[in-house]
Amino acid sequence: MTEDNKLNKEDIESLLDETGPEGEDSSSVSTIATDDSDVDLSAYDFSKPYSVSKNFQKNLLAMCEVYARVATLGLTMDYRAKCKMVFNGLQTLTYEEYHATLPNPTCVGTALLPPLQGHALVNLDLSLAFVLLKRLLGGRPEPEKELRKFTDIELGISGNVVSSLLEYLKEASSKFVTINPEEIFIESNPEFLNTPAAGESMILLEFEMEIEELKGKMSLCIPSIAFEPVRGQFDPAEEFVQRDDEEIAAERQDVKDTIEDATTELIVKMADLDLPFSFLDGLETGSVIDLGTGSNSIMELELQGKPIFQCKAGHYNGKRAVELTERITEED
């Protein structure tokens, strides 16, 4: 930089004054940086729970699909009505996020699901809960005209409704671990629940339930930490089995014994010829084709179309044979 191009003190101060007292001019820079429509950035939320492993999720989804089938059959038999349960998916979230989705009033309860740790939350649409209550008492499965809180008697009966829904988990989870629901406590107001901490990581299993013409949602929300005692059953770690020398030798011998009796095709390639079709058209019995090679010329032995040895023609015990002279390497 030359002396003429240098900024003096007055020039620098005038430039600083133009930006304003609070750095107002910097907003134009941030605007330019965020105007790119191709960039879709969002801040990472460190309060979000950890994601579950693919293997754990796969097994949990399999259990939920079985639960939906078992519940469909069980509800139909228990309530003598056309019922159906469909699994709608799995997601991870905090308890605070789950609690915000619960309506008031609703049918929500806590339950122990040993051998899982802690309490799980079960939520059933209030409209569905009233229909199941009516059906359980011998009434028609008609929707309630006005959704309201349960009476004390209805609150006790609704515990049996939720208990029957959770009982289907025994059969559905039997492939991994047998879950035995107990100590089910029902509330109409989700604010009265004895619940986990707001930021605790939860696994939400969502289902859609149908009885006659009425549809609604049922969800099972379980703390992620609850699966720790049975983590190995739902997310088994891959074990590396170290084989000893005897096992390796026996395996190699098995392979050798298997291929020793197998047949394969060996071809001795004597020559490559380029012949016009007119020559081939004139061939007949007794015609002689000159291969252009002598009796001592090098030929190739091919195994399954791949050349593996160079060889020479000869005789052995009165029969035509070849003598292998050199192995053909990959470089050749």
Image (cartoon, rainbow, N blue to C red):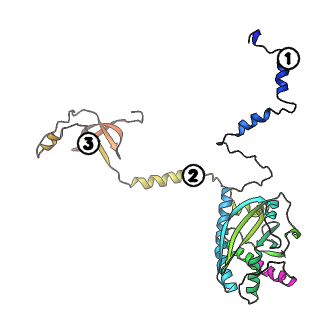
Between residue 218 and residue 314, name the one nearer to us.
Answer: 218
Q: Dot 2, crowdedness within 10 Å: few (<14), some or many (≥20)?
A: few
Q: Secondary structure at mark 2?
A: helix
Q: Is residue 164 above or below residue 197?
A: below
Disc 1 vs disc 2: which is toward the camera?
A: 1
Spot occupied by residue 170 in the image (x, y as percentages of width and height): 71, 75
How far is disc 3 from disc 2 in space, using C-alphas?
40 Å
Going from the N terminus, do you reach mark 1 or mark 2 first? 1
Q: Dot 3, crowdedness within 10 Å: few (<14), some or many (≥20)?
A: some
Residue drawn at 82 percent across, 33 percent down: 24
* Callout 1 amino acid: Glu
* Callout 3 amino acid: Ala
Dot 3 and dot 1 residues touching (CB under 8 Å): no
Residue drawn at 47 percent across, 53 percent down: 255
Residue 186 magenta-highlighted: no
Q: According to the image, label 1 marks what residue?
A: 10
Quarter of the view holding residue 109: bottom right
Q: Secondary structure at mark 1?
A: helix
How far is disc 3 from disc 1 in space, using C-alphas?
102 Å
| Stretch in magenta | 141-163
Q: According to the image, label 2 marks what residue?
A: 246
Spot occupied by residue 219 in the image (x, y as percentages of width and height): 74, 69
Quarter of the view holding residue 204: bottom right
Q: Is residue 285 left or right of residue 129?
A: left
Q: According to the image, label 3 marks what residue?
A: 321
Q: Which mark is residue 166?
A: none
Q: Is residue 237 above or below residue 138?
A: above
Between residue 116 and residue 68, name the one nearer to us.
Answer: 68
> Quick check: can you spot residue 113?
no
How far is disc 1 from disc 2 in space, using C-alphas?
88 Å
